[in-house]
Amino acid sequence: MRNERTGELRQVSVNATVVKASDGSFNGVVLAVQDVHNAVEAERELARQARLDPLTQILNRRGLSDAVDRWSDTRGIPPQAVLVCDINHFKTLNDTYGHAAGDSALRILARVLSECATEHRIAARLGGDEFVVVGWDHLEGLESEIHHALSSEFSALPISEVSVSCGLTLNKSGVALEQLMNQADQLMYERRANKRGLRVA
């Protein structure tokens, strides 16, 4: 319904009650109209917030799953690549300088990943200091973009050792998202343990 004064479209709830005369014949209809626009918008906002990580304001795991399902349906193919990122020395940063410093590092990484996410990519926080980028391209050059951006962003943190490790998995056989993320996660931890470059499978 459109507000006659402001021209704004509002969502309303309409209930109709039939009024009958004493002899049972039809005597009219009473309409009860209630403006529910604000309540509906509030419900939508709650649903949106349930899919976002409250600290970084990027998608959480639930939001990622929903977004991947929608994007896969639209494109007709599953994700083609997954890049998992984890912050090195995050616990040291948290324990030594407090959660404010750790939260700052998380927000920085989330912002960088969001900026690197194109129309073919989705960025999300999986939990803790672990993040993911899901792509319908092969995410070529993405790790270089991330490291280039973080080289200046992380310089403001109180310890210089903070960096990220990444693992990249290409979807060569159309496997499910969780399997892709598990593969990328394993490669990331192998890379960190061996202190080698980006691992790709």
Image (tube, rainbow, N blue to C red):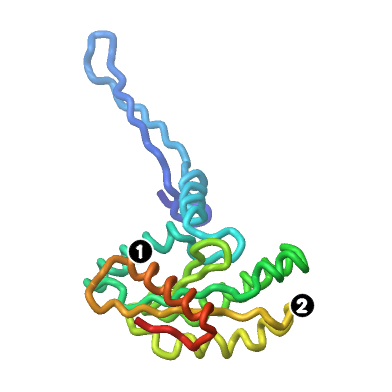
Q: Could you tell me residue 174's position as x and y percent?
A: 23, 72
In this picture, residue 179 sits left or right of residue 133? left
Residue with the most extreme top position: 23
Circle count: 2
| Element carrying mark 1 | helix
The residue singled out by tag 2 in the image is: 158
In the rendered image, which quarter is residue 119 located in? bottom left
The local crowd at label 2, few if under 14, some if 14 to 19, many if 20 or more residues have their Cα within 10 Å, is few
What's under tag 2, amino acid-wise?
Answer: Pro
Secondary element under disc 2, as helix, strand or loop, is: loop
Residue drawn at (42%, 43%), measured in percent from left and top?
A: 12
Taking the spot 25% from the left edge, 73% from the top edge, the residue there is 75
Residue at image coords 40%, 39%: 13
Q: In which quadrant of the rendered view does residue 152 lie?
A: bottom right
Check disc 1 and give the amino acid type.
Glu
Quadrant in which residue 140 is drawn? bottom left
In this picture, is 156 found above or below 51? below
Residue corresponding to mark 1 = 178
